[in-house]
Image: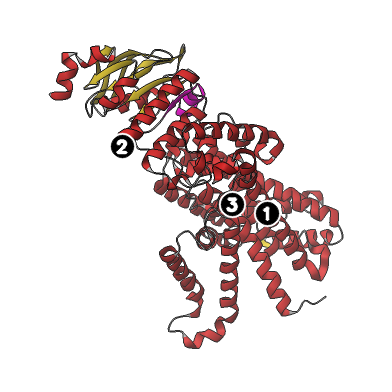
Amino acid sequence: MVLKGIRKSFEGLVALEHIDMNVSKGLITMLIGPNGSGKTTLLNVITGFYTPDRGEVIFEGKNITKWPPHKIYNEGLVRTFQIPQPFKSLTVLENLVTAYRENPGESFVKALFRKSWIKDEEEAVHKAFKILKILNLDHMWDRPASHLSGGQMKLLETGRAIMSGAKMILMDEPASGLNPKLANEVFSYIVKMKKELGITFLIIEHRLDLALPYVDRVLAMCRGRIVCEGEPKEVFNNPIVVESYLGG
Amino acid sequence: MTIPAQALFVIDLLATFSIYVIIALSLNLEYGYTGIPNFGKVLSVAGGAFTVGFFPGRLLSLMLKIDPKIDYATRSHEVVTIINNFLEKNVLLSLGIFFATLLVACVVGAILGFIASYPAIRLREDYLAITLLAMGEAIRIIGYNYTPIVGGTLGVMVPDPFRWSGGLRYVTSTLFISLIALIVFLYLERLVRTPLGRTLKAIRENEDVARSLGKDVTRIRTKTIMVSSVIAAVGGALYAFHSGNVHSLTYHRASWTFWPWVMVILGGAGNNVGVILGTFIFVSVRKFIIFYKGYLSPFLPFDVVWLDLLLLGLALIIIQMYRPQGLLPEKPTPTISFDKIRELYVSKKDET
């Protein structure tokens, strides 16, 4: 994924300026920066929730700038949210199956003809159970998502993203609110998915100590700009990054 | 053939109940399952009824070559008397015109639904509710002030497609209405147990997340409002046929928007069976109050005509305070039964 000259402002307040960046395929890239540096805004721009003032978002050679979120999703670019947002009245299984792409049973006409969608639905359920097993949530498949703990909701969000058959997943603070053990488990799953499914990850994370061992590249943001990028150690030793965190 | 008064009461109850089941279920599809607060339900109900007031009388008038100088909108009683005399002896044409009118009402409902969905794409809950409320008001006012549609201040008589059944006219009409209500119920029950039903609930829960999972929320909301409006228009058309006339003032927001809301909330939003129960309780209680209000009058410190509205308003407040999920709360509507999923994917070891 390539971003070229992205700018985003809100009634004069510039949130993103001159964002040029590359996210390499098959790697886990971490986006860091102090609060208010524009990380989540950037994620919203990439996934179509915000329209940039200027600049381009290129994903797998396609210019997806200003595309609506659902269209971007169908290209295989999927996001999760900072605060886990499961569909609370749906079961854990239904939450995953909802993310299944292009289910013919979602058409108002085809929905009435069970034969036209039941095979896809069974395939979706089969795939969902595989993911739930990986995430250790399979024993809770028939419970409403509202019954899950905060950590399990995070895992469910990750599961939904995988369910879509995503090529790239953008995660907004996947470890926030999790105890260190569970946070390490989440990152282990992410590495596993990268290796087994070849998924590219762009992760916003504040808990640098936890995330660092798992990531391949780091991008640092400050005041709406990318200030540094490279190998994790290289970025963390960069004086601008240090100053951004400690003095910014 | 004379029908006893008690039987007439039951037939009337069943007809009113069935018409409101259709309309309340259509609202449940929008609000209960998709989270669209349609406070303009009367728009599509009136659309269906106005279709009955406008279309079949004029069509039959042309078919029967009734003097074109007789203006249907202002002299409908003359035209309809001639038409009904003809329909009395022609069952096939009667039923043909009945179903053709319902079809046109569906088209009108879909168009009105599409118009109503225009703000639904752009506005969120409270603003959308107010806009839809205004749209519902508009159709009644237009119908009242523009005579050519349904006769303006005087209203119009409509052809009676059940005249052929003679003294059993109301029984026949009620049977047709009940049958259509049953079809609507079965259709919606089937719809909510599909991947689409699940997606509607997902949109209701969080439309941003639904968007992020590839759901074209705008398109789905538009279609939901259109389908719901088609159903409500059928309800309005059936009411018009059953009552034999159309007057725009009949299509008031209290009767055709607020009451269906009470039925949905009372029974349980997001549960079609609950909505049917809510509708039954509402319609029955109201009918009984109306029937017996003469007896209650001496005991009340206010005019008895307000009793049913007061009691139903009170019931709504009590439900909201003590059982906001309604009498029958929402239940899971799986596309594949839990038992089958357990059998296929969950081993006994996993369950223990």
The CA span between labels 2 and 1 is 65 Å
Up/down of B19 relative to A146, above or below: below
Q: Is residue A74 magenta?
A: yes
* Residue range corresponding to the magenta coloring: A66-79
Residue type at mark 1 is Val
Residue under numbered circle 3: B26
Task: Give the quadrant of residue B275.
Answer: bottom right
Up/down of A76 relative to B27, above or below: above
User: Residue A179 bears which disc, if any?
Assistant: 2
Residue under numbered circle 1: B52
| Mark 2 or mark 1, whichever is nearer to me | 2
Q: Chain of mark 3?
A: B
Residue type at mark 2 is Asn
| Element type at mark 2 | loop
Which residue: 56% across, 63% down?
B278
Q: Is residue B247 visible?
A: no
Task: Give the quadrant of residue A194.
Answer: top left
Contact between labelled residues 3 and 2, with CB atoms less than 8 Å apart:
no
Q: Position of residue B146 (x, y in %)?
A: 56, 53
| Element type at mark 1 | helix
Horizontal relation, residue A25 to residue B22: left or right? left
Assess disc 1: are there few (<14), some (14-19) or many (≥20) residues with their C-alpha within 10 Å of its C-alpha: many
Residue type at mark 3 is Ser
Assess disc 3: are there few (<14), some (14-19) or many (≥20) residues with their C-alpha within 10 Å of its C-alpha: many
Q: Are marks 2 and 1 on the same chain?
A: no
| Mark 2 or mark 3, whichever is nearer to me | 2
Which residue: 53% across, 40% down?
A93
In the foreground, A129 or B267: A129
The CA span between labels 2 and 3 is 46 Å
